[in-house]
Image (cartoon, rainbow, N blue to C red):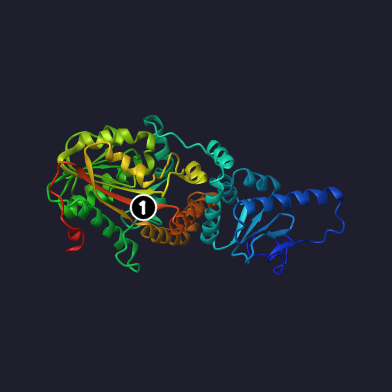
Amino acid sequence: MNREDPELFGVSPNEGDVGISRTDRAHDTPGQRSTRWVEGYIVRSLLGSLGNPPIRITLWTGESICTAASSPVVDIRIRSFSCLLKLLINPELYFGDAYSTGLIEVDGDLVKLMEVTYQGLARMRDSGLRLRLTKWLNRRHSNALADSRENIHHHYDIGNEFYKLWLDRQLVYTCAYFSSPDITLEQAQIAKMDHVCRKIRLRPEESVVEAGCGWGALALHMATQYGARVKAFNISHEQIAYARERAHALGVEHRVEFIEDDYRNASGRFDAFMSVGMLEHVGPEYYRELRHVIDRCLDRSGRGLIHSIGRNRPNPLNAWVEKRIFPGAYPPSLREMLEVVEDWDFSVLDVENLRLHYALTLKHWLQRFENASSLVKEMYDERFVRAWRLYLAGSIASFSNGDMQLFQVLFTRGTNNDIPWTRAYLYDR
């Protein structure tokens, strides 16, 4: 299939910039004309509910519709009536499904399309009836202890070789820290790990408990670069196996213990608590359990840092991303995030938002993913490639739009007076 062929859907390149273009309908029956009126009505309703964004929709009939006052920035081609109807009912979920399976084709900048679409979806969520309907249709997966392992397995245990194709060399799958926008992804991920270690003022021989350790890059960095002793918890089997192999290769098994278990089972006393990119998988209903873990594990003068994707106000994650890519995920608002520590004797020392750093991180990931897309297709299939392309493009749009945030919250025991007077310690070398 040639995605650039303008005749594929029976519409010439000069048709349908604004309004409606039609193929020859002289021989249409009344029933056909009635059906096409319904199709056009649904498209206008869908575009209107999104705020009439600069999008042109071309139907399988060859009809093109754009309700925006300005020229369209991207074309969406819809292949069937059932696909169109599902988009009207639940656009958040069914757009991703239809794009993944090829029932929707996108001609133009996919990131730009997601930016204008998310802006419209935000307005749709604000309407009472639709808000209640979409919440019911898009119920989130549970993060109960019995379900959490399956949620993590769905995303992280799909093959380390896949992630090696587009992450940095250490497989850091969280927001990087760009001291300058033109440094490499590898440099920015090392800078992020240094940034969080400096925030908690990590010292040689201090002990750290890490909740959710990914492929182990941060735990190994804390051990090799700061001389810390780390216990890192993760329920992804493939990630833990890879992390243990790296610890063995680096000769630091005596400093880093990678434990294949749920964070809720962590015990012992530590100088620091670290959680980078794990809170999104906890769910607000389990923040109390996380508080118990932190209180149980953190020493009297201990410090903690939580790094998490977040929102400006409470809202569920995009329904398609939650159901197909990240089951159980929930990015909290800053207020919700602070609930993890504020009900106990903890003091928040610093809050930082790295939203634009994550947008740039994702741009690096998407470019690398596209460069490796033929290999990804060989490993999985075209549907998988399209789904992950959409996930990464949509994530860029979310952070660029300001719909998603990246919060880092630094805290300590409320009775701990061994705290910095200024933030100079973060930047002095």
Residue at 22%, 35% (x, y): give it: 295
Between residue 82 and residue 158, name the one nearer to us: 82
> Most extreme residue toward the top, as rendered?
146
Work out whether residue 279 can be spotted. no
Between residue 297 and residue 47, name the one nearer to us: 47
Instruction: Pinpoint residue 195: horizontal percent, then vertical percent.
Output: 25, 57
| Tag 1: amino acid | Leu
Residue 340 as seen in the image, left or right of residue 314: left
Instruction: Pinpoint residue 385: horizontal percent, then vertical percent.
Output: 51, 53
Q: Residues within 10 Å of mark 1 (few under 14, many from 20)?
A: many
Work out whether residue 365 can be spotted. yes
Q: Name the quadrant containing residue 56.
A: bottom right
Q: Which image quarter holds the C terminus?
A: bottom left
Residue annotated with mark 1? 406
Instruction: Pinpoint residue 355: horizontal percent, then vertical percent.
Output: 38, 57
Above-or-below relation of 409 to 145:
below
Between residue 173 and residue 334, name the one nearer to us: 334
